[in-house]
Amino acid sequence: MLYLLLLTQPLLGLLQTGARGQPVDFYFLIRLPNVIGIDRPLARQLHDLHALTANALLILIGLHAAAALFSPLHPPRRRAGGDAAGALAADAETDCTAGRIGASLAETNSERPGRWRP
């Protein structure tokens, strides 16, 4: 969804600028040709869509950043069945809650007998 919005945003801006009849400069190096004729009502609609995708991008980027900040605080839970990934997740959860984020896996496993060991 993020990539779709990232592609749609500049295309809507290009179409909107062309519909208003203004030239589009590509980083002040070359002037892009108009891909659409001058049409003021269409330009207004394209502007509204451009603003809507901009707001959707801001919300999606904010949610993405919040999830990235929130995920280290809540590591995955140990799965039923005691598989290796679940044991590592349980060790990581214990280390985080005990304030020992920098402890190595070898240290952690040697201090806890009966845990899964690589």
Image (tube, rainbow, N blue to C red):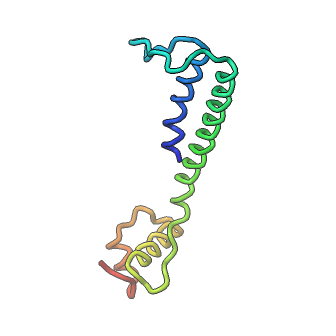
Is 116 left or right of 47, judged from the image as shown?
left
Q: Nearer the viewer, residue 21 or 51?
A: 21
Q: Quadrant of residue 112?
A: bottom left
- Residue in view at x 35 percent, y 67 percent: 104
Residue lying farthest left?
118
Q: Quadrant of residue 20?
A: top right
Q: Nearer the viewer, residue 19 or 13?
A: 19
**Measured from the top left, where is residue 82 in percent x and y?**
43, 84
- Residue in view at x 54 percent, y 40 percent: 5
Above or below, comparing residue 102 to residue 15 in the picture? below
Where is the C terminus found, in terms of image quarters? bottom left
Q: Nearer the viewer, residue 114 or 22?
A: 22
**How many tags in the picture?**
0
Is 99 left or right of 87, judged from the image as shown?
right
**Measured from the top left, where is residue 56 in percent x and y?**
62, 40
- Residue in view at x 52 percent, y 11 percent: 23
**Measured from the top left, where is residue 107 in percent x and y?**
34, 73
Above or below, comparing residue 24 to residue 87 in the picture? above
- Residue in view at x 59 percent, y 22 percent: 16
Q: Quadrant of residue 61?
A: top right
Above or below, comparing residue 72 to residue 78 in the picture? above
